Amino acid sequence: MKRSRVDKLRDLMGKKEVDYVILGPTSNMFYLTGFTDEQMERPLLFIVSRDEAYFLAPKLYEEQLSQTGFSVLSYHDGEDPYSLTRMEKRSRVALDDQLWTAFTYQIEKRFSPTLSLASSLLMELRSRKEQEEIDIMMEGITTAESSFLDFLNEVKEGLSECELARKLEEEFSVRGVSPSFPTILTSGYNTSMPHLRCTNRKVKKGDVVIVDFGIKFKGYSTDSTRVVSVGSPNPEVKKVHDVVVRAQEEAESSVSGMKAKDVDRLARSVIEKEGMGNFFIHRTGHGIGIDVHEDPYISKGNEEAVDDNMTFTVEPGVYIPGKFGVRVEDMVLMKGRVRPMNSLSKEIYIV
Amino acid sequence: MKRSRVDKLRDLMGKKEVDYVILGPTSNMFYLTGFTDEQMERPLLFIVSRDEAYFLAPKLYEEQLSQTGFSVLSYHDGEDPYSLTRMEKRSRVALDDQLWTAFTYQIEKRFSPTLSLASSLLMELRSRKEQEEIDIMMEGITTAESSFLDFLNEVKEGLSECELARKLEEEFSVRGVSPSFPTILTSGYNTSMPHLRCTNRKVKKGDVVIVDFGIKFKGYSTDSTRVVSVGSPNPEVKKVHDVVVRAQEEAESSVSGMKAKDVDRLARSVIEKEGMGNFFIHRTGHGIGIDVHEDPYISKGNEEAVDDNMTFTVEPGVYIPGKFGVRVEDMVLMKGRVRPMNSLSKEIYIV
């Protein structure tokens, strides 16, 4: 299976006139080889040409990488890695979007290539999921949701946001999985900052709590958000939550082939009609797969079509600075129409 | 304090004739602003010129970033971020080494700059630690070591490498900290692969187990390695361990101002004298601070001097393919001579 993904990539390289694709230890490398790692200061690259596909890696990875079935060119510390490659100067090279600039800088100095970004080839493949990938993601969501439900029993007044985030991550840990991103768990007025992770603020009665969580499962990511209330929810929060859920349901009425920007519009218009348009300060969603965020982005101005077998999040939100914010996020699969991947109710969870 | 780091950077920008430093949400951003995040597909940049220093960020970060004291230029999804900057074309721009290539590609297209890497400015500052940074790192090491010692009570036959790695990470979690890198915990023949994380291989009597672990503590990293034996250690492992520890002690006899390559040589010559030189397949160590790996790299060919207030690891290892590997790793501070930062004994821990 992994071999045939390299073959599909080569077809696209032919069409788009690219001589080499150079990937770092990122989601792209994982997609093609099954291997990935943290990006570090020494080049650990996967290089695909029309007739070769090999790793360029520090010696200490050699034994491990040879188990992938691809060949490995390895170098010792102090040796010049790039002298080992068979790359020609002034070629057309597509570089991994997530590759560190330090490597791009070295490659530009060394090979004077004509650059493009590998996403223009690889996202065409990766954004349309194979059945095997969808199955893994569904299994991941089941694990993430059961973690969330068990975690709810542990939410109580007096615990800080970061203590609560840790409790959720411990639920992941007992299930043998790790977070796909640092859990976002905010409370009270902090909920108006959609990308704050957590603080030492202690959760108290009447607080709204936003839990935006995901796990990495067999290399694939999940990402979901639910609203929790400590005691009965404040009527203002309830009202906003109701608008947000309606916006989400509206976006989930989209069908295959619609433009991403029109899916965004569906959610946005519900919120605008309620006079809350200025408080919806982000896009409606993003593709998800190996990366938490990948194509297709469900945002204003994105003319791309949302096609069959694409998986993405639908996550409208309303954030009133200094007061509170509400977001509800689900993962969906496009297949003719939107198929929900999550099973959790969209309600406010009262603890 | 953070303000003055920006001022120091500006001094270097003047000396090295750099007009703009552009950083992603990396260790460099954390060093200058106290803020960092996961790198994502939307530009979240910190831009320093001779007279300005500001964030360029998606709207949803605005409220959060304004708490850093720096100004924030924020953009909505669908808006062009770069049109907000006041950067001039064809300037001299130093880019964050860890910035994703996608952003470098956009910046090159848009501004046709003369590029360099920000490490050439920032590592000069970051590699010499302030006392406050050293204190944080010492506190981090204490936490990591107590986690390791408690974890040792849980090592037993029949558990897999990944189960054991998780147990160590749970010790981190109860102390309110996270790993600075995915824990490396390998056993038996797997120990010959120095960067394998963990597998489902079950640990059994007579196994050597390598535990390479670190935590993130107040933004700073720790990194240490110890050897564990399940039951009495095999005499061959004992012999190699003894050589590795002697190599480590030899490197720890180095003094301020020595070249990094000569510190590497000290460790390497002990291992070579025992005829094991071909099995020491990596460098002797790496600087450590906010990043797990940063300047100075203690490797062959590195002419850089190891100066006072630099913190780095000393971690020689011997890896016999298909058999076993041994590595012992400590963090040290250079101050006249090498000052050990770890307190753990270098012995083989028998469980």
Image (spheres, coloured by chain):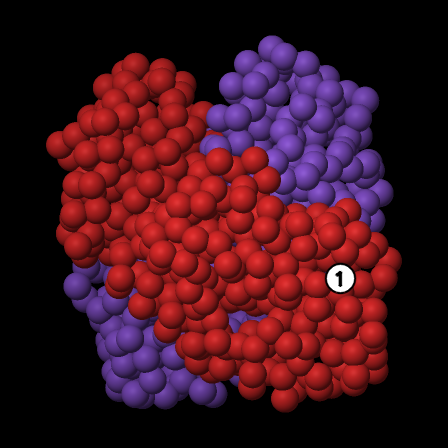
Chain colours: A purple, B red
Q: Is residue B255 left or right of residue B263?
A: left
The C terminus of chain A is located in which quarter? bottom left
- The answer to which image quadrant residue A55 occupies is top right
Q: Is residue B75 left or right of residue B161?
A: left
Residue B80 in the image, given as x and y percentages of width and height: 32, 29
Residue A252 can be seen, yes or no: no
- Regarding mark 1 in the picture, which secondary structure is present there? strand
The residue lying at 20 percent from left, 41 percent from top is B8
The residue lying at 83 percent from left, 54 percent from top is B321
B89 and A118: which is toward the camera: B89
| Count of marks overlaid on the render | 1
Specify the farthest residue to the top. Answer: A90
The N terminus of chain A is located in which quarter? top right
The residue lying at 27 percent from left, 81 percent from top is A202
- The answer to which image quadrant residue B176 occupies is bottom left
As displayed, is residue B61 above or below residue B351?
above
The residue lying at 81 percent from left, 36 percent from top is A71
Q: Chain of mark 1?
A: B
- How packed mark 1 is, by other alpha carbons closer than 10 Å (few <14, some 14-19, many 20 or more), is many
Q: Which residue is mark 1?
A: B325
A256 and B269: which is toward the camera: B269
Residue B228 in the image, given as x and y percentages of width and height: 69, 76
Residue A153 can be seen, yes or no: yes
Q: Is residue B11 left or right of residue A117?
A: left
Q: Is residue A13 left or right of residue B126?
A: right
Q: Give the amino acid type for the residue marked by disc 1 in the picture.
A: Gly
As displayed, is residue B307 above or below residue A111?
below
As displayed, is residue A262 above or below residue B237?
above
- The answer to which image quadrant residue A215 occupies is bottom right
Residue A200 in the image, given as x and y percentages of width and height: 29, 75
As displayed, is residue A55 above or below residue A130?
above
